[in-house]
Image: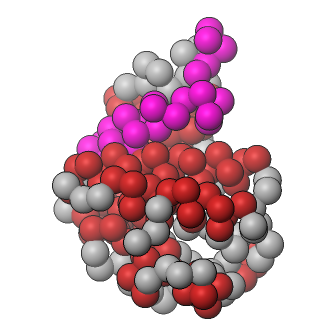
Amino acid sequence: MLTLERAKELNATMVSEDHLIKHAISVSAAMGAMADHFGEDREHWMAIGYLHDYDYEKYPEEHLQHTREPLLAAGLTEEEVRAIMAHGYGLCSDTEPVTALEKSLYTVDELTGIVQACARMRPNGITDLEVSSLMKKFKDKKFAAKCDRELIKGGCDMLGMEVRDVAALCIEGMKQFAAELDLQGTEA
């Protein structure tokens, strides 16, 4: 089973850009909160989240086309690789998310971008970010415009959850990593 330590080792062989490392931490943190919500293995879900963009820095135009074989060769299981492949469903992968793990990764990948952007605008960063504030920004399509709201809504529908409930989990998960994410705010 993939551990968080192993996911970080593997990711470090392919990812060096600071913003991509922060994204890996954000998604990992959100996946930990999702695992808690579903009563699943927190570290395992965090490891999958950390490693999800394994090939993106080196192959942005061919994202996920250089993931399957190297990760299987590195010892990941078919299920672990499938979860990573499913996060690109409809964009760069035809692997449809079917498990709670896959659906969660598909959803929080985009949603963490909005959480990060929202936290960066606040004096206390993510430390006092409320879901109501995030949802106002979520409705503003010009805010964090690259984050696909329809994909997030679709992922929440797959999970049978409301956007605000998944957002609350993402915020709580990411708060624990505020310092690593540089999201403590300007007052820190």
Q: Is residue 133 left or right of residue 160?
A: right
Can you see residue 86?
A: no
Q: In which quarter of the image is residue 144?
A: top right
Residue extent of the magenta highlight: 162-188
Q: Which residue is drawn at 47% across and 62% down?
A: 3
> Does the segment drawn in magenta span residue 174?
yes
Q: Nearer the viewer, residue 19 or 111?
A: 19
Q: Is residue 9 left or right of residue 27?
A: right
> Residue 115 in the image: x percent, y percent?
50, 39
> Residue 106 in the image: x percent, y percent?
43, 67
Q: Please say if 72 is above or below 182.
A: below
Figure coloring: secondary structure
Q: Residue at x 55, y 56 (%)?
A: 5
Q: Which residue is drawn at 60% across and 81% down?
A: 74
> Residue 94 in the image: x percent, y percent?
48, 89
> Does the segment drawn in magenta span residue 28?
no
Q: Please say if 145 is above or below 13.
A: above
Q: Is residue 64 left or right of residue 132?
A: right
Q: Quadrant of residue 143?
A: top right
> Quarter of the image containing the C terminus?
top right
Q: How many marks?
A: 0
Q: Is residue 38 left or right of residue 43?
A: left
